[in-house]
Amino acid sequence: MKQERFSIVGMTHPVTNSNEFLPGPVLLLGAPGVGKGTQAKRLMDAFGIPQISTGDLLREHRKNHTPLGMMADDLMAKGQLVPDDLVNEMVAKRLTEPDTQRGYILDGFPRTLNQAEWLDQQLADSPLPVVAVNIVVPERELLERITGRLSCPVCGTIYNVYSEPPRHARVCDREGAKLIQRVDDTEPVFYERMKAFQSKTAAVIAYYRAHGGRFAEVDGSVSVDAVMESIRATLFRLRQYSGT
């Protein structure tokens, strides 16, 4: 069996070739700015698995006027939140599609303890349970990642005044255009998002941490490649631990 080797926490773990190793259901956790989206895309490319976003599912069902989508429309028209039961049904339907057999990346789900418990029940007969990987970055670094972010309106190049500044202040190296900052990339908004993240995910993190062998943390303050390496090694270790 062809193997690659990836180091994590000072140890070396064999990681099977992407065509042979089944990552199964993976939940990426982490505060705003840790790079979940970037790592999810890399995992999708590496293993040929889809990303399942509850936001995308909701938009798709509403756009296609499915029974679930029409129920969501009715609730939202009344100013009500879409309940867990309805979101769970959308996820359950998505998990029956063939592209999920090797695994999938969960995005925005489960957000609550009830959803995490429901998902375990839904997957009770599946060969692989959900494993959760929490990407950890110091809060100060996250603040700088977000509040220091600038982009070119012409070519889309992303800069950061703290870590990847342009050669000339607020001017794109390629286009010479004035760089712009998103209106929500501010310190007050960052701390509000952090509060929301902590309040929503604390119970989910505790749930997976309590289920031994299904939770791990990786350092997200290193390079993008190094984070990916750690996540892949962690997935293999978690699957070895559970015997799957």
Image: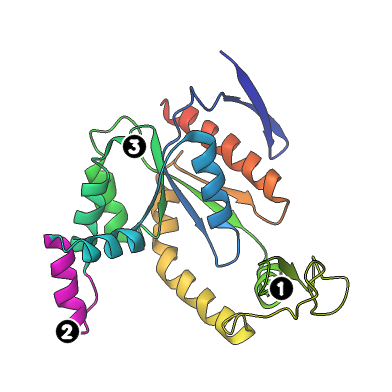
Position of 128 relative to 164 (above/below): above
For residue 112, say whether it is visible. no
Residue 200 falls in which quadrant of the image? bottom left
* Image side of residue 200 versus residue 195, left or right: left
Q: Which amino acid is tagged 3?
A: Asp
Residue 101 falls in which quadrant of the image? top left
How far across and down, in percent of the image, does residue 174 sit? 80, 66
Q: Which amino acid is tagged 2?
A: Lys
Looking at the image, is mark 2 or mark 3 earlier in the sequence?
2
Looking at the image, is mark 3 or mark 1 earlier in the sequence?
3
Q: Which mark is residue 144?
A: 1
Position of 49 relative to 118 (above/below): above
User: In the structure shown, which secondary structural element does the residue marked by tag 1 occupy?
Assistant: helix
Eye-nearest disc, 3 or 1 = 3
How far is the residue under mark 3 from the one under mark 1? 37 Å
Q: Which mark is residue 99?
A: 3
Q: Which residue is mark 2?
A: 78
Eye-nearest disc, 2 or 3 = 3
Eye-nearest disc, 1 or 2 = 2
Nearest the viewer among 171 and 29 is: 171
Q: Which residues are magenta?
A: 67-82
How far across and down, in percent of the image, does residue 57 sit? 30, 58
Q: State the predominant SS element of the stretch in magenta.
A: helix
How far across and down, in percent of the image, does residue 155 sit? 68, 67
The structure's colour scheme is rainbow
- Report if residue 235 lies within the magenta region: no
Badge 1: few (under 14), some or many (20 or more) residues near its Cα, within 10 Å? some
How far is the residue under mark 2 from the one under mark 3? 35 Å
